[in-house]
Image: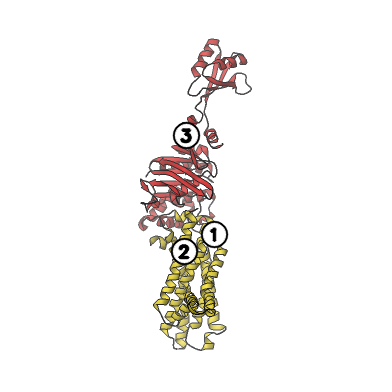
Chain colours: A yellow, B red
Amino acid sequence: MNAICTIAKRELSVFFNSLIAYMMIGLFLGFNGFFTWLYGNDIFILSEANLGVFFYISSWTLLFFIPAITMKMVAEEKKSGTLELLLTKNIKDRDVILGKFLATIALISIALLATIIYPITLANIGDLDVGSTLCGYLALLLLSMTYAAIGIFASSITSNQIVAFLIAMIIGLCFHVIFGVIAASSKGFLGVFFQQLGTQAHFESIARGVVDSKDLIYFLSITSVGLFLAEISLAKSHVKG
Amino acid sequence: MDVHVENLTKTFGQQKAVNNVSFQVKTGEVLGFLGPNGAGKTTTMKMITGYLGIQKGDIKIGGNSIINDFKDYKKHIGYLPEHNPLYLDMAVTDYLKFCGSLQSIPNAQIDARVIEMVKVCGLNREKHKKIGALSKGYRQRVGLAQAMIHNPSILILDEPTTGLDPNQIIEIRNLIRDLGKEKTVILSTHILPEVEATCDRILIINKGEIVANGTASSLKKQAKGQEVLKVKIEDAEGNNVLEALKALPTISNADYAGRDPHVFELQSHVDESSKRAIFNMCIQHHWALTEMIPMEQKLEDVFRDLTLN
């Protein structure tokens, strides 16, 4: 546990010592703020004290921002050779993966925490449903965990950051939309299967305020599988040489 | 802690990088790992550190196999990788604290260890700089500092003195010698005088196999086993002397050493010495023996003999 925290702390300090974290959080907030409050089907057009728009927009922005955060995590260490340094310390491959995962989640949590001003504002101008808002944030967090695990896996299979970013995006897109599209055009078992495999249905159900154990298990298992695959590919890349 | 390497084998695709290598290093010994590029030095070292998986064979640290029954063995090893990869965006002390923490040093002791390493490796003036701003020599020192931060009983150093200036090289060699008194040190290098200066024992590896194993002096003897002398004999005609020398039963080969007709280079038969015979011969002929220099076989020659097929 100690090693995981040490690695996560280092990752976070790298983020905040360079411009990356500030740019990411700034862009995330700017993007979400723009579409939530100013443009398109924004809150004022819907005229409901409901952050549904924000959660929907965020589910899309996270799809792009998380791969941008995770793309360098393992790939860069592989390229610069520091992975060797890290893995010959008294730690396990799993500690590295979990440390990096924890750092990603911490960074996203900071970004999400900064949006706390949205519900506060809404609560002042209307009657905000606190329960469903909290559920919305929970859904975003679970979704972030899933994409972070996918992103770290993508980063662990290559030493090229751009490739890692693109792979994470493609896998993320599959879960986010493509499985849903396949589900809509298939019938019977296949349709149900793909609908359950996509993140969209599970995300919407939690964001609506229904915390079902089925959805929780879904997000946690996709996350675990992603992290597990990342660990395997990390081990494979150095043990086999 | 002793390191036992037993029948270690590693293949990358078709190529056998390390082929059935066995050796052991004891506590208080500095082992020099020599070999041409691509001989398998780094691969062997990476397997000992646990970075590369072991395909065949075994490595035992303090009697425990690292494959099966020794989970925490990495904390006994300090490792300086070949190209000395470092986090360039971290300050020296932060980086050392990070490494100390990963080596499971208790939090209360980390600062003290970092201060000690900064002192030992001469990093005091650079300790707050980012590693990316340091010169190669200082980065090498940071690499050494991180390898030693947890006071490991085994040190594995892959080319520790590359990029250092001559003063630093001497400092680092002295440091390694000091460390070698109580630790097990395995170092690889291309610089042959360095091996002679720092190592108790030398292992020469070529094409994945061990071709020599012993102290510098025993290797030199083993390589040729012949006494080579340079003698200067005056008050005589050069050709007469040469013929008389060739006639001596212990001498296998004799010739002029250079243009000077009085200086000769002589090779004795294996395990025989010609020094007395030459002396007696000079007395007999009333020649003046003014110089007799035993020519030492250089480690470079030994290395070339063993690795150039």
Q: Nearer the viewer, residue B138 or B158?
A: B158
At a point 42% along the width and 43% down the height, the residue shown is B6
At a point 41% along the width and 73% down the height, the residue shown is A217
**Residue denoted by label 2:** A229
Numbered badge on residue A142:
none
* Residue A224 found in image quarter: bottom left
| Mark-to-mark CA distance, 1 and 2 | 16 Å
At a point 52% along the width and 12% down the height, the residue shown is B283
Mark 3: amino acid: Ala
As helix, strand or loop, the secondary structure at mark 1 comes to loop
User: Are the residues flagged by discs 1 and 3 from a single subunit?
Assistant: no
Badges 1 and 3: C-beta atoms under 8 Å apart?
no
Q: Nearer the viewer, residue B100 or A172?
A: A172
Q: Answer above or below: position of A143 versus A38.
A: above
| Mark-to-mark CA distance, 2 and 3 | 49 Å
Q: Residues within 10 Å of mark 2 (few under 14, many from 20)?
A: some
At a point 41% along the width and 62% down the height, the residue shown is A4
Badges 2 and 3: C-beta atoms under 8 Å apart?
no
**Residue denoted by label 1:** A159
As helix, strand or loop, the secondary structure at mark 3 comes to helix
Numbered badge on residue B216:
3
The chain carrying label 2 is A
Q: Position of residue B90 (x, y in %)?
A: 49, 58
Extreme residue in the right direction: B259
Q: Residues within 10 Å of mark 3 (few under 14, many from 20)?
A: many
Q: Position of residue B180 (x, y in %)?
A: 41, 41
Q: Answer above or below: position of B106 versus A213.
A: above
Extreme residue in the front direction: A188
Q: Answer above or below: position of B238 versus B119.
A: above
